[in-house]
Amino acid sequence: MSDTPEQQVQEISRPQMTGKRVLVTGVTGWVAGPVATALAASGNTVYGAARFRDPAQREPLESSGVQTISIDLQKARFDEVPNDIDVVLNFAVAKVNDFEVAFAANAEGPAALMELCRPEMFLHCSSTAVYAPDDHKPRRENDPLGDSHRPMPGMPTYSISKIAAEVLVKYTARRLGIPAVIARLNVPYGDAYGWMMFHLMMMERGIPVPVHVNQPTSYTPIHSDDIVRSIPYLLSLASVPTTIVNWGGEDVAGIEDWCTEMGRLTGLTPEFAPTEATIAAIVPDLTKLHSTGFRSHVDWRTGLARQISTTRPDLLK
Ligand SMILES: NC(=O)c1ccc[n+]([C@@H]2O[C@H](COP(=O)([O-])OP(=O)(O)OC[C@H]3O[C@@H](n4cnc5c(N)ncnc54)[C@H](OP(=O)(O)O)[C@@H]3O)[C@@H](O)[C@H]2O)c1
């Protein structure tokens, strides 16, 4: 779908980031890879960091103009980090069962990296997983926090270590006088990644998709194109003390909605399994994000169609 006239105006006047030395952590992950390659393509010197235990992961990034370096946030191993980094975008996350490892990698690591780099600006990618879900009420940045991901199998440390990370990032940024922004991301997806891909696989195999008993299981998905576009807007909020901002797309859509839409596109019929053992709906209030002038452009149905065309064109009707 092409942009509306309002979106075209926003596009012309939108803030850009160029000519910066940027360190992007978590670069082999879903969210950070497209951000790093887009920043490299728009005139920045981009260092993409991860452990790179599989060296083959470097090649596609290097060929997109991202200089890859190995770091280990858990161990504070930063010997390959170059000097004079202007901007750090911290997307790395360890999704592990061990709290000690999770705190070291997700909380102490970013603080130590900030201390080392002392950048002009630091963006820490957090998650709306830090909120205590409260029915379907939109969550504002000062709403109560909680362990929302605990019921989800395999995510016991996630919410708590992301909360710990926010505290350490905020404290360290204030102590060092570094303008920082903590952006609480909702449900990211792109042409080649996203939670929906797992749901599509389940639909293909006739496995019921877990949804929360308090349906609908609503979120505000944001497409990778919009994640990339939003970076300069988020950085415009970097401040001392740190600003916290919710980060999501315009539309509220639930797992039930996107599975139904994927069914329409593919002819597969979703089955749902309401359960307490999954993440409840978390809808972020986006007032603060919108105050920067940012609005997402890719509506979730278009984004979903793009994703299936890219990853599973064989399933399209
Ligand atoms: N995915 C979501 O649905 C979602 C939703 C809300 C917020 N977020 C947030 O978005 C950010 C990106 O998430 P994602 O889903 O893209 O992550 P991901 O795909 O799981 O990737 C994690 C990244 O972190 C790196 N990493 C893990 N442990 C590390 C360590 N000890 N040292 C250095 N790097 C390490 C990994 O690379 P190596 O293993 O090669 O080191 C990888 O590049 C995270 O902050 C996450 O909390 C994600």
Image (tube, helix red, strand yellow):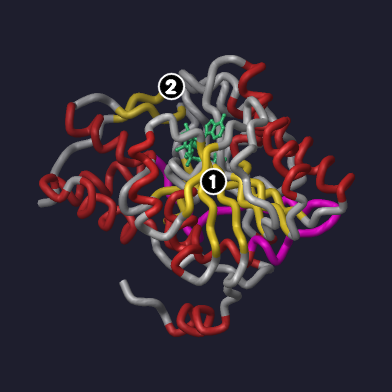
Q: Which residue is mark 2?
A: 275
Q: Is residue 53 left or right of residue 259?
A: right
Foreground: disc 2 or disc 1 = 1
Circle 1: residue type: Asn
Tell me whether circle 2 and circle 1 mark residues in contact (CB < 8 Å): no
Residue 116's disc number: none
Which residue is at a point 84% across and 40% down the rendered structure image? 171
Viewer-proximal residue among 119 and 212 = 119
Disc 2/disc 1 C-alpha distance (Å): 21 Å
Locate residue 90, reporting x and y percent. 61, 45
Viewer-proximal residue among 177 and 67 = 67
Which residue is at a point 33% across and 38% down the rendered structure image? 56
- Element class at badge 1: loop
Marker count (numbered): 2
Q: Is residue 132 shown to the viewer in this render?
A: no
Circle 2 packing at 10 Å, graded few (<14), some (14-19), many (20+), is: some
Locate residue 159, reporting x and y percent. 62, 29
Residue 186's disc number: 1
User: What residue range appears in magenta?
Assistant: 234-255
Circle 2: residue type: Thr
Q: Is residue 255 left or right of residue 177?
A: left
Which residue is at a point 51% across and 71% down the rendered structure image? 43
Locate residue 294, reporting x and y percent. 58, 68
Q: Is residue 47 left or right of residue 147?
A: left
Which residue is at a point 52% across and 38% down the rendered structure image? 70
**Residue 144 forms part of the magenta stretch:** no
Respond yes or no on whether mark 2 lies under 8 Å from ligand 1. Answer: no
Locate residue 124, reporting x and y percent. 66, 47
Viewer-proximal residue among 222 and 34 = 34
- Element class at badge 2: strand
